[in-house]
Amino acid sequence: MLGWREALEERMLFSLLIVSVIWVVFSFASLYAFSQIISLIGVYHSLDAENICRKLWEIGKCNGALSLPLVFSINLLLQTTLSNPDAKSGFYLSLPITASILMIIRILANPSMSLKPSHCRYYASTEDKLGAVALHKERILSFIYAFIISAIIILLLLFCYAVLMNQPFDRLKMPPLTCFEIAESFVAYLLSLASATLLGELILKARPPIIQVPSKPYRG
């Protein structure tokens, strides 16, 4: 009996070591990687200095990376809080919701004259107003970073718990899909992501951000 307990404790300690390594590596990597991606979301180059196709490609890559934790988290929330939810409907619903969130994030992180902070009217000089807008951008990006990282931390906690308890990792509650449904979902995902990226950039083109970063003309 004593030997069984010792073996169980050794196995638990070994599992804790593995989980600790996984937690350190993945949390550090995700915190660093997503901080870089979110920083890019808050940067806007004027269209006369950057090729529009290149801009859409770069922002599309950022949106693609940010969309993954959002899709999983939204789907997990729907599946665990609603009683008897339809798994496929919840998964499909998470796609346009994620695309809409990403578009809103891009627009709010680059405020224009119509979306500038209301307290700008209390400043007389242009320099002070630009400082207020820059501070507003930092707050928006900090909130977005905390929101994305919270979703990642929740998923990582569930994964580490499954590893520690030697359980299958089925906490994402992803619906069982056929090959056709997987292809259909992938196409819908790409279309929603591309539409959100394009619409967001068109809105920013019509309502140029107050703070723009100059860049060298793109030579394709």
Image: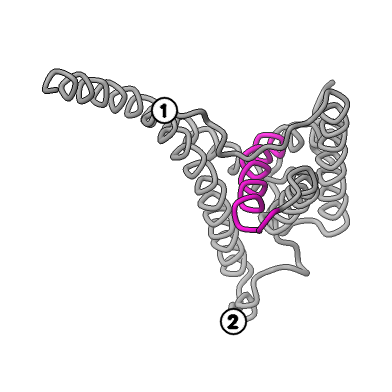
Q: Is residue 208 magenta?
A: no
Instruction: Reply above or below: 67 against 216.
Output: below
Viewer-closest of 187 and 36: 187
Instruction: Reply above or below: 35 against 97.
Output: above
Q: Residue at x 53, y 31 (%)?
A: 169
Mark before the other along the chain sequence, 2 or 1: 2
Viewer-closest of 149 and 90: 90
Q: Position of residue 54 (x, y in %)?
A: 81, 30
Q: Where is residue 82 in the image (x, y as percent from the top left)?
A: 65, 58
Q: Where is residue 11 in the image (x, y as percent from the top left)?
A: 26, 21
Report the residue marked by disc 1: 163
- How packed mark 1 is, by other alpha carbons closer than 10 Å (few <14, some 14-19, many 20 or more), is some
Quadrant housing the N terminus = top left
Q: Which residue is drawn at 81% across and 40% down?
A: 193
Count the labels in the image: 2
Start-end of magenta stretch = 62-84
Quadrant housing the C terminus = top right
Q: Is residue 104 left or right of residue 14?
A: right
User: Which element is circle 1 on?
Assistant: helix
Instruction: Reply above or below: 113 against 176.
Output: below
Q: Is residue 172 left or right of residue 21?
A: right
The kind of residue tagged 1 is Val
Report the residue marked by disc 2: 122
Q: Is residue 83 magenta?
A: yes
Residue sticking out furthest to the bottom:
122
The kind of residue tagged 2 is Tyr
Q: Residue at x 47, y 42 (%)?
A: 153
Instruction: Reply above or below: 92 against 21.
Output: below
Viewer-closest of 130 and 167: 167
